[in-house]
Image (cartoon, helix red, strand yellow):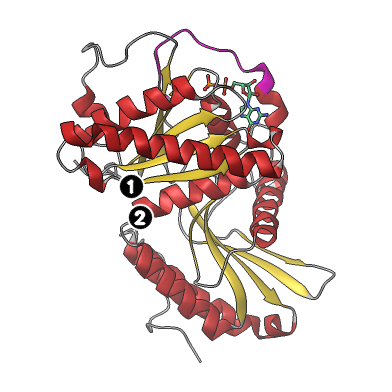
């Protein structure tokens, strides 16, 4: 089974103890719920919650581990669950006692690994907004240490388990850390990531752009970026731009547009008072390019637009979503 579904979307499972924050993460990242509203999310009593969002580039499910119930008692066919899954995110509430969560993490990783050795395991050390810098670091160190020690103890029983790599992210729904962490997870699942990054590098170097992100519009996860380092402020700025554009288009955009407010003609330019420009263009049904560049470089918008069309063409080919639309006839960026 491939980690991608039929339409090429990465498949992700979100697991963790009840109240660790899974539904909140899903609502904030994929449904634009504001973090404060999650306080009123109802807790369900079902063992398994399933949520699949089809309007995003990412497909995911949520699984609860309620209290004492043993999820692995044989009542669920886990070969299905883990077999087709690309990444398993285990959410741990860092504001709570996490010993029970670490136990479940261990059982889950061992179980999932036996079924599907190619699964990527990620731990979100979540709700860190309530911790100060020192405690944050100490908690991360402690959880990392205990989780890897527990796994080492299980090595003997499962061949190959020593090759497992767990990644850890400090997250909170109250800032952009949850989006950043999710972006990293999705990037692990994109088989064509290196090609996307090369295309972005090519685009920015030929167009005088400083930073470019390829965004999943609905979730504001970035699927790829160029090779220059990501600074959180630039990322947040680009996220804000997407929100503004989608909100305005949603309110004032043409009605009767089947694809909603976001379509092939969606683009936006925002000039900031520090001499930089934010430029957004639609790439395909799910994805948009958002770039940051200096205002002087934006004078050559024609070149940027031409390069962008070549870039979009290439991206669409990568995702095998080439449509019948008119495309530039030459290949490769201008200049
Ligand atoms: P689930 O049972 O794992 O789906 O957990 P919920 O999503 O229902 O969240 C449980 C509680 O944790 C809710 O009251 C949320 O508001 C709260 N919560 C979720 N994420 C965060 C976070 O990042 N920081 C803080 N402080 N609280 C959070």
Classify 98 as above or below 262. above
> Label 1 crowding class (10 Å Cα cut-off): few <14, some 14-19, many 20+?
few
| Residue 259 seen | no
Q: Is residue 44 magenta?
A: yes
Q: Is residue 309 visible?
A: yes
Residue 275, image x, y percentages:
80, 76
Q: In the drawing, does residue 42 fall left or right of residue 84?
A: right
Q: CA distance from mark 2 to mark 1?
A: 18 Å
Residue hosting label 2 = 190
Majority SS type along the magenta span = loop
75 relative position to 166: left or right? left
Q: Is residue 172 magenta?
A: no
Name the residue located 82 percent from the left edge and 72 percent from the top edge. 274
Label 2: few (<14), some (14–19) or many (≥20) C-alpha neighbours in 10 Å: some
- Residue at the spot 24% in from the left edge and 28% down from the top edge: 111
For the point 53% across and 36% down, the residue is: 125
Q: Position of residue 102 (x, y in %)?
A: 43, 27
Residue, disc 1: 165
The residue range painted magenta reads 39-50
Element type at mark 2: loop
């Amino acid at each position: 089974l491939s980690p991608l579904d039929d339409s090429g979307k990465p498949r992700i499972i979100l697991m963790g103890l009840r109240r660790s924050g899974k539904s909140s993460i899903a609502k904030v990242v994929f449904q634009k719920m504001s973090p404060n509203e999650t306080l009123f999310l109802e807790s369900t009593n079902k063992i398994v919650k399933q949520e699949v969002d089809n309007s995003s580039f990412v497909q995911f499910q949520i699984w609860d581990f309620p209290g004492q119930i043993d999820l692995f008692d044989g009542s669920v066919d886990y070969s299905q669950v883990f077999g087709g899954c690309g990444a398993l995110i285990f959410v741990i509430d860092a504001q709570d006692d996490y010993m029970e969560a670490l136990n479940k993490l261990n059982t889950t990783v061992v179980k999932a690994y036996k079924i599907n050795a190619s699964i990527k395991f990620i731990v979100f050390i979540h709700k860190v907004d309530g911790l100060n810098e020192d405690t944050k670091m100490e908690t991360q160190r402690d959880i990392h240490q205990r989780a890897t020690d527990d796994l080492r103890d299980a090595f003997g029983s499962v061949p190959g388990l020593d090759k497992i790599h767990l990644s850890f992210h400090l997250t909170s729904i109250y800032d952009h850390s949850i989006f950043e962490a999710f972006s990293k997870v999705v990037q692990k699942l994109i088989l064509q990531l290196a090609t996307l990054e090369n295309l972005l590098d090519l685009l920015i170097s030929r167009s005088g752009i400083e930073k470019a992100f390829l965004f999943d519009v609905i979730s504001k996860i970035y699927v790829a970026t160029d090779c220059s380092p990501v600074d959180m402020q630039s990322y947040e700025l680009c996220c804000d731009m997407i929100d503004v554009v989608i909100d305005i288009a949603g309110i004032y955009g043409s009605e009767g547009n089947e694809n909603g407010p976001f379509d092939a003609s969606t683009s936006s330019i925002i000039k900031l008072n520090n001499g930089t420009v934010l430029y957004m263009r639609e790439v395909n049904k799910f994805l948009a390019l958002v770039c940051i560049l200096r205002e002087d470089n934006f004078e050559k918008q024609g070149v940027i637009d031409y390069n962008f069309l070549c870039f979009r063409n290439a991206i669409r080919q990568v995702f095998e979503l080439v449509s019948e639309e008119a495309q530039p006839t030459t290949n490769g960026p201008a200049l």
